[in-house]
Image (cartoon, rainbow, N blue to C red):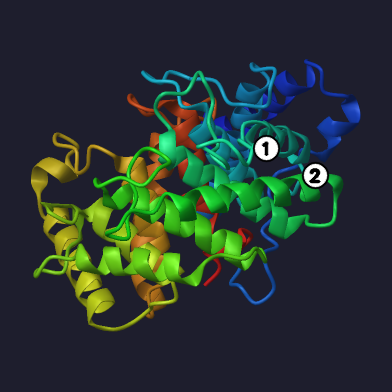
């Protein structure tokens, strides 16, 4: 059977497996492949590779839904992860369902999305007297920490933007207000954040980037966000840039990478910075580094991994290039990454990650493949 034939067959199998559980038959009829009809004004991508990518996304969404049915509280299971991070992975799965057209209670995966959101709301600390007021956490989860809180806040913000007037929308608004306050109240003196939800001397770029994007999502959804908090955070990101244009892991830590640079650029874009010397030199470094990597035979042959965090890197590269002033930069990068993702997908619909598990890798991959569809508010150009 051809690769595309196998994907189509496995999509049907995945949907049948989902319908064999507690899901009523009428829900099964709603699970249709994603449509090439996109947001008005966006280009409809309909090459053979684009059609194969839509099939791959349909298969992945069904796989995510099947995983969720293994849990009873709306969270996502470990799915092969060495460490369990249900807050982060549940938030990422929710974002993946929204990025492909589902909204709370509506669409092919509206029920699964609703359960995921309820889990995030239920795990938000709403006691205003608590030292961790607004923090999204799970006693089972020692890994997600403020990274997970950022993704959870972003997922709730996107859901609230899509469905603000519903009963769940009102619950989302309450949880979001608290989650935003948690971010604002825990910002360090340097403008960044660390892994715990409190003011610390330590700070690092990847957490800061995640939390700034969460604030951007909340602000776009209509919540009040302290402008000074965002300005201090963007200042932290700018100061983390090295002379060569790349961005450090943290101020005071000279380590930089493609992933961190892409994430920093995506965050500056989220803050409204699309040009200027900081952004332009960052893009110049990124393009040069990727060109050098492509000439590395060991990387091209797969003998040496380009990144220890390939899904994280691809997730932020997609966002950074999507906002680039020249559309061809994204198109050329995306065509190759789309091809790689199609080759790497497992027959049952998953992508794999040894560290953080298949839910994480699958959700991240869907978010990359679905980005040009323009359905997730925070990633609109």
- Residue 96: x %, y % from top left: 58, 44
Residue found at the far bottom of this picture: 276
| 233 sits left or right of 289 in the view | right
Q: Is residue 129 above or below residue 218?
A: above
Would you say residue 259 is visible in this rendering? yes
Q: Secondary structure at mark 1?
A: helix
In the foreground, 196 or 81: 196
Q: Quadrant of residue 344?
A: top left
How many residues crowd mark 1 within 10 Å: few (<14), some (14–19), many (20+)?
many
- Residue 300: x %, y % from top left: 17, 45
The residue under label 1 is: 121
Residue at 62%, 42% in the rendered image: 128
The residue under label 2 is: 168
Residue at 67%, 45% in the rendered image: 175
How many residues crowd mark 2 within 10 Å: few (<14), some (14–19), many (20+)?
some
Q: Is residue 12 above or below residue 134?
A: above
Residue at 80%, 44% in the rendered image: 168
| 69 sits left or right of 46 in the view | right
The tag earlier along the polypeptide, 2 or 1, is 1
- Residue 91: x %, y % from top left: 56, 39
- Residue 47: x %, y % from top left: 53, 60
| 182 sits left or right of 337 in the view | right
Mark 2 and 1 residues: CB-CB less than 8 Å, in contact?
Answer: yes
In the foreground, 319 or 149: 149
Would you say residue 335 is visible in this rendering? no
Q: How many marks?
A: 2
Mark 2 to mark 1 CA distance (whole Å):
9 Å
Q: Secondary structure at mark 2?
A: helix
């Amino acid at each position: 059977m051809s690769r595309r034939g196998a994907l189509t067959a496995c999509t049907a199998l995945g949907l049948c497996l989902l319908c064999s559980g507690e899901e009523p038959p009428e829900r099964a009829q709603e699970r249709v492949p994603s449509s090439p009809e996109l947001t008005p004004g966006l280009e409809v991508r309909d090459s053979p590779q684009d059609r194969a990518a839509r099939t791959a996304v349909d298969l992945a969404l069904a796989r995510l839904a099947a995983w969720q049915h293994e849990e009873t509280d709306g969270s996502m299971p470990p799915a092969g992860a060495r460490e369990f991070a249900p807050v982060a992975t549940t938030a990422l799965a929710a974002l993946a369902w929204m990025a492909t057209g589902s909204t709370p209670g509506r669409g092919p995966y509206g029920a699964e999305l609703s359960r995921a959101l309820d889990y995030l709301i239920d795990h938000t600390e709403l006691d205003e007297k608590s030292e961790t007021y607004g923090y999204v956490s799970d006693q089972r989860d020692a890994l997600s920490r403020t990274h997970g809180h950022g993704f959870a806040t972003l997922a709730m913000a996107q859901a609230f933007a899509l469905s603000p007037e519903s009963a769940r929308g009102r619950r989302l608004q309450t949880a979001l207000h608290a989650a935003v306050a948690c971010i604002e109240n825990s910002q360090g003196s340097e403008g960044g954040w660390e892994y715990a939800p409190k003011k610390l001397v330590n700070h690092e770029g990847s957490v800061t980037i995640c939390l700034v994007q969460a604030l951007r999502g909340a602000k776009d959804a209509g919540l009040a966000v302290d402008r000074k908090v965002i300005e201090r955070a963007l200042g932290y990101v700018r100061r983390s840039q090295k002379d060569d244009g790349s961005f450090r892991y943290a101020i005071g830590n000279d380590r930089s990478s493609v992933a961190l640079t892409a994430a920093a650029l995506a965050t500056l874009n989220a803050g409204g910075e699309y040009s200027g010397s900081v952004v332009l030199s960052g893009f110049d470094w990124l393009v040069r580094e990727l060109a050098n990597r492509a000439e590395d035979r060991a990387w091209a042959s797969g003998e040496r991994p380009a990144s220890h965090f390939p899904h994280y890197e691809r997730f932020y590269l997609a966002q950074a290039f999507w906002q680039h002033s020249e559309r061809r930069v994204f198109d050329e990068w995306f065509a190759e990454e789309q091809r790689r993702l199609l080759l790497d997908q497992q027959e049952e619909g998953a992508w794999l990650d040894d560290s953080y598990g298949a839910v994480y890798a699958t959700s991240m991959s869907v978010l990359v493949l679905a980005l040009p569809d323009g359905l997730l508010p925070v990633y609109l150009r």
